[in-house]
Protein backbone atom coordinates (compact mmCIF):
# COMPACT_ATOMS: atom_id res chain seq x y z
CA UNK A 1 0.00 0.00 0.00
CA UNK A 2 1.51 3.32 -1.11
CA UNK A 3 0.11 6.34 0.73
CA UNK A 4 0.44 9.97 -0.34
CA UNK A 5 -0.61 12.94 1.79
CA UNK A 6 -1.81 16.27 0.40
CA UNK A 7 -1.40 19.12 2.88
CA UNK A 8 -3.33 22.21 1.71
CA UNK A 9 -1.76 25.30 3.28
CA UNK A 10 -2.48 27.96 0.67
CA UNK A 11 -4.95 30.07 2.65
CA UNK A 12 -4.58 33.82 2.94
CA UNK A 13 -5.21 33.83 6.69
CA UNK A 14 -7.41 36.94 6.57
CA UNK A 15 -9.50 35.72 9.51
CA UNK A 16 -6.44 35.80 11.78
CA UNK A 17 -5.57 39.43 11.11
CA UNK A 18 -2.07 40.84 10.94
CA UNK A 19 0.43 40.36 8.11
CA UNK A 20 1.63 36.77 8.63
CA UNK A 21 -0.48 34.04 7.04
CA UNK A 22 -1.94 31.77 9.70
CA UNK A 23 -0.09 28.63 8.60
CA UNK A 24 3.24 30.41 9.20
CA UNK A 25 2.45 31.81 12.65
CA UNK A 26 4.51 30.22 15.38
CA UNK A 27 3.62 27.77 18.11
CA UNK A 28 6.52 27.27 20.54
CA UNK A 29 8.96 28.97 18.14
CA UNK A 30 7.98 26.74 15.22
CA UNK A 31 5.52 27.51 12.37
CA UNK A 32 2.11 25.85 12.69
CA UNK A 33 2.67 24.23 9.30
CA UNK A 34 5.96 22.70 10.45
CA UNK A 35 4.22 21.05 13.41
CA UNK A 36 1.64 19.56 11.02
CA UNK A 37 4.14 18.29 8.47
CA UNK A 38 6.30 16.69 11.15
CA UNK A 39 3.36 14.55 12.28
CA UNK A 40 3.16 13.07 8.79
CA UNK A 41 6.94 12.81 8.53
CA UNK A 42 6.94 10.64 11.67
CA UNK A 43 4.02 8.42 10.59
CA UNK A 44 5.52 5.34 8.97
CA UNK A 45 2.48 4.61 6.79
CA UNK A 46 2.98 7.90 4.89
CA UNK A 47 5.25 7.54 1.86
CA UNK A 48 5.05 10.97 0.19
CA UNK A 49 3.84 14.43 1.17
CA UNK A 50 2.62 17.06 -1.31
CA UNK A 51 2.54 20.50 0.25
CA UNK A 52 0.23 23.05 -1.38
CA UNK A 53 1.22 26.63 -0.53
CA UNK A 54 0.63 30.24 -1.62
CA UNK A 55 2.52 31.31 -4.73
CA UNK A 56 4.46 33.95 -2.83
CA UNK A 57 5.51 31.49 -0.11
CA UNK A 58 6.81 28.53 -2.15
CA UNK A 59 10.48 29.36 -1.53
CA UNK A 60 9.82 30.14 2.16
CA UNK A 61 8.17 26.73 2.59
CA UNK A 62 11.10 25.03 0.88
CA UNK A 63 13.89 26.70 2.84
CA UNK A 64 12.37 27.73 6.17
CA UNK A 65 10.10 24.77 6.79
CA UNK A 66 10.85 21.68 4.68
CA UNK A 67 14.65 21.95 4.69
CA UNK A 68 15.00 23.55 8.12
CA UNK A 69 12.98 20.87 9.89
CA UNK A 70 14.25 18.00 7.67
CA UNK A 71 10.81 17.01 6.39
CA UNK A 72 12.20 14.60 3.81
CA UNK A 73 8.85 13.08 2.79
CA UNK A 74 7.82 16.34 1.09
CA UNK A 75 8.47 15.49 -2.56
CA UNK A 76 6.90 18.60 -4.08
CA UNK A 77 5.67 22.05 -3.04
CA UNK A 78 2.77 23.06 -5.28
CA UNK A 79 1.15 26.41 -5.90
CA UNK A 80 -2.33 26.66 -4.44
CA UNK A 81 -5.53 27.62 -6.21
CA UNK A 82 -8.24 30.19 -5.62
CA UNK A 83 -10.25 27.99 -3.24
CA UNK A 84 -9.26 25.11 -0.97
CA UNK A 85 -10.84 22.64 -3.40
CA UNK A 86 -8.66 24.04 -6.20
CA UNK A 87 -5.58 23.66 -4.02
CA UNK A 88 -6.35 20.03 -3.19
CA UNK A 89 -7.00 19.36 -6.87
CA UNK A 90 -3.61 20.88 -7.76
CA UNK A 91 -2.04 18.43 -5.33
CA UNK A 92 -4.10 15.54 -6.65
CA UNK A 93 -2.81 16.17 -10.16
CA UNK A 94 0.79 15.76 -8.97
CA UNK A 95 0.36 12.56 -6.98
CA UNK A 96 2.77 9.68 -7.52
CA UNK A 97 1.10 7.30 -10.05
CA UNK A 98 1.55 4.22 -7.84
CA UNK A 99 -0.39 5.84 -4.97
CA UNK A 100 -3.18 3.64 -3.56
CA UNK A 101 -4.44 5.83 -0.71
CA UNK A 102 -4.64 9.64 -0.57
CA UNK A 103 -4.74 11.50 2.75
CA UNK A 104 -5.87 15.14 2.82
CA UNK A 105 -5.11 17.10 5.98
CA UNK A 106 -5.33 20.80 6.85
CA UNK A 107 -1.97 22.51 7.14
CA UNK A 108 -3.27 24.45 10.15
CA UNK A 109 -4.40 21.38 12.09
CA UNK A 110 -1.11 20.59 13.89
CA UNK A 111 -2.33 18.36 16.72
CA UNK A 112 -3.45 15.34 14.74
CA UNK A 113 -1.91 12.19 16.21
CA UNK A 114 -0.06 9.38 14.48
CA UNK A 115 -2.70 6.96 15.80
CA UNK A 116 -5.53 8.93 14.14
CA UNK A 117 -3.61 9.08 10.85
CA UNK A 118 -2.90 5.34 10.92
CA UNK A 119 -6.45 4.37 11.87
CA UNK A 120 -7.97 6.52 9.14
CA UNK A 121 -5.64 5.00 6.53
CA UNK A 122 -6.46 1.46 7.65
CA UNK A 123 -10.20 2.14 7.50
CA UNK A 124 -9.93 3.80 4.09
CA UNK A 125 -8.04 0.76 2.81
CA UNK A 126 -11.00 -1.40 3.91
CA UNK A 127 -13.90 0.87 2.97
CA UNK A 128 -12.63 3.38 0.39
CA UNK A 129 -13.56 6.66 2.09
CA UNK A 130 -13.06 7.82 5.68
CA UNK A 131 -13.19 11.12 7.54
CA UNK A 132 -12.16 12.02 11.07
CA UNK A 133 -14.84 13.68 13.21
CA UNK A 134 -16.02 14.14 16.79
CA UNK A 135 -19.59 14.01 18.17
CA UNK A 136 -21.22 17.40 18.72
CA UNK A 137 -21.56 18.25 22.42
CA UNK A 138 -23.49 21.52 22.15
CA UNK A 139 -27.08 22.07 21.14
CA UNK A 140 -27.13 23.31 17.54
CA UNK A 141 -29.90 25.50 16.16
CA UNK A 142 -30.74 26.60 12.64
CA UNK A 143 -31.06 30.39 12.54
CA UNK A 144 -32.40 32.75 9.87
CA UNK A 145 -32.46 36.55 10.16
CA UNK A 146 -31.54 36.33 13.83
CA UNK A 147 -34.40 33.96 14.69
CA UNK A 148 -34.31 30.26 15.52
CA UNK A 149 -35.85 28.17 12.77
CA UNK A 150 -35.13 24.68 14.07
CA UNK A 151 -33.31 22.82 16.84
CA UNK A 152 -31.25 20.03 15.31
CA UNK A 153 -30.86 16.57 16.81
CA UNK A 154 -27.45 16.73 18.48
CA UNK A 155 -27.17 12.93 18.57
CA UNK A 156 -26.93 12.88 14.77
CA UNK A 157 -24.36 15.68 14.45
CA UNK A 158 -20.59 15.33 14.19
CA UNK A 159 -17.95 18.06 13.83
CA UNK A 160 -15.79 17.23 10.85
CA UNK A 161 -11.99 17.35 11.08
CA UNK A 162 -9.14 16.08 8.96
CA UNK A 163 -7.51 13.86 7.85
CA UNK A 164 -9.96 12.76 5.19
CA UNK A 165 -8.69 9.62 3.49
CA UNK A 166 -9.72 7.92 0.26
CA UNK A 167 -8.73 5.25 -2.17
CA UNK A 168 -7.30 7.01 -5.18
CA UNK A 169 -9.99 6.02 -7.68
CA UNK A 170 -12.73 7.23 -5.32
CA UNK A 171 -11.38 10.75 -4.79
CA UNK A 172 -10.40 11.12 -8.44
CA UNK A 173 -13.91 10.21 -9.56
CA UNK A 174 -15.41 12.63 -7.01
CA UNK A 175 -13.23 15.52 -8.17
CA UNK A 176 -13.97 14.82 -11.84
CA UNK A 177 -17.71 14.97 -11.14
CA UNK A 178 -17.31 18.22 -9.16
CA UNK A 179 -15.30 19.82 -11.95
CA UNK A 180 -17.78 18.70 -14.60
CA UNK A 181 -20.63 20.18 -12.54
CA UNK A 182 -18.66 23.29 -11.48
CA UNK A 183 -19.51 22.31 -7.89
CA UNK A 184 -17.57 23.46 -4.84
CA UNK A 185 -17.95 21.63 -1.53
CA UNK A 186 -16.72 22.59 1.91
CA UNK A 187 -14.55 19.48 2.20
CA UNK A 188 -13.40 16.47 0.18
CA UNK A 189 -15.96 14.09 1.68
CA UNK A 190 -18.82 16.26 0.40
CA UNK A 191 -17.55 15.61 -3.15
CA UNK A 192 -17.39 11.87 -2.49
CA UNK A 193 -20.89 11.91 -1.01
CA UNK A 194 -22.18 13.50 -4.26
CA UNK A 195 -21.13 10.47 -6.30
CA UNK A 196 -23.05 8.18 -3.95
CA UNK A 197 -20.01 6.57 -2.30
CA UNK A 198 -20.45 5.85 1.44
CA UNK A 199 -18.07 7.70 3.74
CA UNK A 200 -17.21 6.18 7.11
CA UNK A 201 -16.35 8.16 10.25
CA UNK A 202 -13.33 7.62 12.50
CA UNK A 203 -13.46 9.35 15.87
CA UNK A 204 -10.99 12.21 16.16
CA UNK A 205 -9.88 14.29 19.12
CA UNK A 206 -10.96 17.54 20.77
CA UNK A 207 -7.28 18.53 20.60
CA UNK A 208 -7.24 18.18 16.79
CA UNK A 209 -8.20 21.83 16.31
CA UNK A 210 -7.92 23.93 13.17
CA UNK A 211 -6.09 27.17 13.94
CA UNK A 212 -7.75 29.97 12.00
CA UNK A 213 -8.34 32.64 14.67
CA UNK A 214 -6.24 34.36 17.33
CA UNK A 215 -8.30 32.59 20.00
CA UNK A 216 -7.45 29.21 18.49
CA UNK A 217 -3.77 30.19 18.45
CA UNK A 218 -4.01 30.72 22.20
CA UNK A 219 -5.63 27.29 22.54
CA UNK A 220 -2.87 25.78 20.42
CA UNK A 221 -0.18 27.11 22.74
CA UNK A 222 -2.12 25.72 25.69
CA UNK A 223 -2.31 22.27 24.06
CA UNK A 224 1.45 22.28 23.49
CA UNK A 225 2.07 22.88 27.19
CA UNK A 226 -0.55 20.36 28.34
CA UNK A 227 1.16 17.58 30.33
CA UNK A 228 1.49 14.39 28.25
CA UNK A 229 0.62 11.07 29.87
Image (cartoon, rainbow, N blue to C red):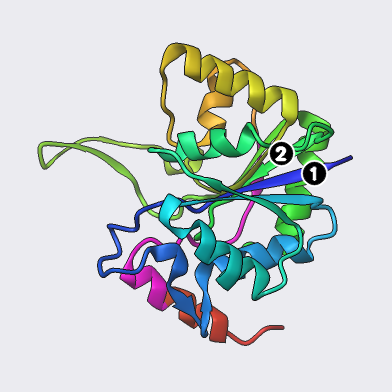
Q: Which mark is residue 3?
A: 1
Whether residue 208 is visible to the viewer of this picture, yes or no, is: no
Q: Which mark is residue 102?
A: 2
| Residue at image location 84% in from the left, 53% down from the top | 45
| Residue at image location 30% in from the left, 64% down from the top | 16
Instruction: Read off the magenta span.
Output: 200-218
Of residue 224 and residue 8, the one placed in the foreground of this image is: 8
Residue 67 lies left or right of residue 145; in this view the side is right
Residue 84 is covered by the magenta coloring: no
Q: Earlier in the sequence, mark 2 or mark 1?
A: 1
Of residue 68 and residue 112, the one placed in the foreground of this image is: 68
Of residue 178 and residue 156, the one placed in the foreground of this image is: 178
Residue 1 lies left or right of residue 118; in this view the side is right
Whether residue 202 is visible to the viewer of this picture, yes or no, is: yes
The quarter of the rendered structure image containing the N terminus is: top right
Extreme residue in the top direction: 180
Q: Is residue 133 above or below residue 97?
A: below
Residue 171 lies left or right of residue 108; in this view the side is right
Q: Is residue 1 above or below residue 18?
A: above
In the rendering, at what x and y percent does residue 13 appear?
Answer: 34, 58
Amino acid sequence: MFVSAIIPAAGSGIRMGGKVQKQFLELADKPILAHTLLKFQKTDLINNIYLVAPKDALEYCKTDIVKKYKITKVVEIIEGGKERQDSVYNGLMRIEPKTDIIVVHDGVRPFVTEDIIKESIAEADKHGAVIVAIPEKDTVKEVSDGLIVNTLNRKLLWRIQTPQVFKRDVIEKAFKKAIDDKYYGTDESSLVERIGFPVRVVKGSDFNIKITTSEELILGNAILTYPKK
